[in-house]
């Protein structure tokens, strides 16, 4: 179907152009131009007008939603050639009356084309009446030429009219005068109406509703000139080129206006970029007004809590939308989730439904992006809060387990160790050396078990954090490290227990990695607090080249820090050592949870 439509349009363009080119060639070869202007200049202008209409028809089929505009242009280009063919075929009685009758059909098509701007359709009732009037006038002239026109052979050099019922040698002249007067009246009516609407309208209406004032004014002049020349036999000289120039300006003005409107639609799409982060109502309204060149444009936003519309400044408006101002129209924008906004704009913009569709799509996309962003932020916040609750619950569980081990199993083992030492002393006093040796070995095994239990409890929760503070805990890690570690802790107040535990285990893992893998000679640990943020920096002078990998030590540090909404950054250049910087949000001491 699409291929057939393409072939049909291509064939129509080729026939229209060929009809004009061949007509000029035949006229030049026969030297028979009839009453039309002749010469190489006129021939070039004649063909160029046809080419302009044919070329603009191709563009119109691509950029105008309705194909009617393109067919009107092709039709005007085709019947533009009728005036050149008419004097050539005057010796064919059944053909020349037909060609003479359709000589000015191109003007009817061009008039309809002007009225159909920019949608390609006749919209208003007044425009429909104009189309009907001009069509009736053309049909009257066409029928009059077929039924009455019969100029003398000496006058026109033609054979008798094969269709004439009541032959009259003056019918052609008077029908021509009547046609020109009627056409001039209708053309002036259209021009005056459109000009008044253009001057009285706002800027959007001037840009969208009427972009061809010069062409229409020149065409009006050309029509007056042609009527005077036809009636009085006046030789207009070089002014004869003004009418075809005006006629040639109309289709480029038509497609130019449509392309301008399409440019507006692309600029409307850019509004999505303006509101890519969030829908700033005032910014969106001002940007849209500037894009559409409508300074009086207003946007009223739906508020779910108020169940009504409000201005961009937050002012509640009456039910049913904003104030209805003269010359304004309202575009309602809804989504599956309910109303979004009302856009009150110049009524002239309603002529381009694609432009309004672009406005609706841009606003819908911006609002959807904003809603998705807010939903994503809420989801991420919920994930952070959930992860922090999990970390806090894990911390409390470890504290309970460490307390149970310390107060339960560990205390019982300590009591058992004391009992064994007492029993060993009694066995030695009683002279039972073999029993004393057995009890001594049991005491040694019990001491080893107690030491392992203390190490296990320290891995579950560092006791030094419970009994001391973060500085002493970091100092203990430094003392236990196999590398010299310089420690600097500048945290004047206690941090939340979860934060202190996170810092402790992160520093412990970093020092262990430095001792095992970096081949470093020295390390340093600094902890500082500024404006509710704790910064921990662990440096070593090892071989560098460390990478954060899932399941690795550095990956574990990152996961542990991000679990409390922090950030871990690792800088490790081969040969220059490794720097691990942790940034963790930390509330004040009053907010610390025990």
Image (tube, helix red, strand yellow):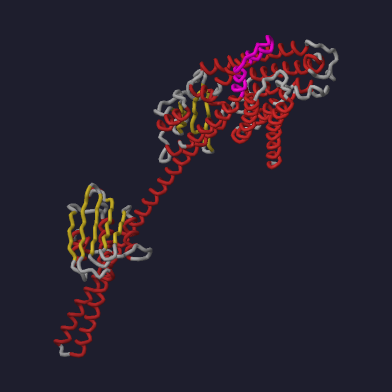
In the image: residue 546, left or right of residue 30: left
Q: Nearer the viewer, residue 560 or 304?
A: 560
Task: Provide the residue span drawn in magenta.
Answer: 223-247
Q: Residue furthest left?
A: 429
The image quadrant where one finds the C terminus is bottom left
Q: Position of residue 133 (x, y in %)?
A: 70, 16
Whether residue 543 is visible: yes
Image vertical order of residue 291 relative to residue 473, above or below: above
The image quadrant where one finds the N terminus is top right
In the image: residue 281, left or right of residue 521: right
Residue at image position (71%, 31%) is 22
| Magenta stretch, overall SS | helix
Query: Quarter-wise, where is residue 407 in the image?
Result: bottom left
Image vertical order of residue 577 relative to residue 427, above or below: above
In the image: residue 125, left or right of residue 527: right
Image vertical order of residue 156 relative to residue 256, above or below: above
In the image: residue 390, left or right of residue 331: left
Q: Nearer the viewer, residue 263 or 513?
A: 263
């Amino acid at each position: 179907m699409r291929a057939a439509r393409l072939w049909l349009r291509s064939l129509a363009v080729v026939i229209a152009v060929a009809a004009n080119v061949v007509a000029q060639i035949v006229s030049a070869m026969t030297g028979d131009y009839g009453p039309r202007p002749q010469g190489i200049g006129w021939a070039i202008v004649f063909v160029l007008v046809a080419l302009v209409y044919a070329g603009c028809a191709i563009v119109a089929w691509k950029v105008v939603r309705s194909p009617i505009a393109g067919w009107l242009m092709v039709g005007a280009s085709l019947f533009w050639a009728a005036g050149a063919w008419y004097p050539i075929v005057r010796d064919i009685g059944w053909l020349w009356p037909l060609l003479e009758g359709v000589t000015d059909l191109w003007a009817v098509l061009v008039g309809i084309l002007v009225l159909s701007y920019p949608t390609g359709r006749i919209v208003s009732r007044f425009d429909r009446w104009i189309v009907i009037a001009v069509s009736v006038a053309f049909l009257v002239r066409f029928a009059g030429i077929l039924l009455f026109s019969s100029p003398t052979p000496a006058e026109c050099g033609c054979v008798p009219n094969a269709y004439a019922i009541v032959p009259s040698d003056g019918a052609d002249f008077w029908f021509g005068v009547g046609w020109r007067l009627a056409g001039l009246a209708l053309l002036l009516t259209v021009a005056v109406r459109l000009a008044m609407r253009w001057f009285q309208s706002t800027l959007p209406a001037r840009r969208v509703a009427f972009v061809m004032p010069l062409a229409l004014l020149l065409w009006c002049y050309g029509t007056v000139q042609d009527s005077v020349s036809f009636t009085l036999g006046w030789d207009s000289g070089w002014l004869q080129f003004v009418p075809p120039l005006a006629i040639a300006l109309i289709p480029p003005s038509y497609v130019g206006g449509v392309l301008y409107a399409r440019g507006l639609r692309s600029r409307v799409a850019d509004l999505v970029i303006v509101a890519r982060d969030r829908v700033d109502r005032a910014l969106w309204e001002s940007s849209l007004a500037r894009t559409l060149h409508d300074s009086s444009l207003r946007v009223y936003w739906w508020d779910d809590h108020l169940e009504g519309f409000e201005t961009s400044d937050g002012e509640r408006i009456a039910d049913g939308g904003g104030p209805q101002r003269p010359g304004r129209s309202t575009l309602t924008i809804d989504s599956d989730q309910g109303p979004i906004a009302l856009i009150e704009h110049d009524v002239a913009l309603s002529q381009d439904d694609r432009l309004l569709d672009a406005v609706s799509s841009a606003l819908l996309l911006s609002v959807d992006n904003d809603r998705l962003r807010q939903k994503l932020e809420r989801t991420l916040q919920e994930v952070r809060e959930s992860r922090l609750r999990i970390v806090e619950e894990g911390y409390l569980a470890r504290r309970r387990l460490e307390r149970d081990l310390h107060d339960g199993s560990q205390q019982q083992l300590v009591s058992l160790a004391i009992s064994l030492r007492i029993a060993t002393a009694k066995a030695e006093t009683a002279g039972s050396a073999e029993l004393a040796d057995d009890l001594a070995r049991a005491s040694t095994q019990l001491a080893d078990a107690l030491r392992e239990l203390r190490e296990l409890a320290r891995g579950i929760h560092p006791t030094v954090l419970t009994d001391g503070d973060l500085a002493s805990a970091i100092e203990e890690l430094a003392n236990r490290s196999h590398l010299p570690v310089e420690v600097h802790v500048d945290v004047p107040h206690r941090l939340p227990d979860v934060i202190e535990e996170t810092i402790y285990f992160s520093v412990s893992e970093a020092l262990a990695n430095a001792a095992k893998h970096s081949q470093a000679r020295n390390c340093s640990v600094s902890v500082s607090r500024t404006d509710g943020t704790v910064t921990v920096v662990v440096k070593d002078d090892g071989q560098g080249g460390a990478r954060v990998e899932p399941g690795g030590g550095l990956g574990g540090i990152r996961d542990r820090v991000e679990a409390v909404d922090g950030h871990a950054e690792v800088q490790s250049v081969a040969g220059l050592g490794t720097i691990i910087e942790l940034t963790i949000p930390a509330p004040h001491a009053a907010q610390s949870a025990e």
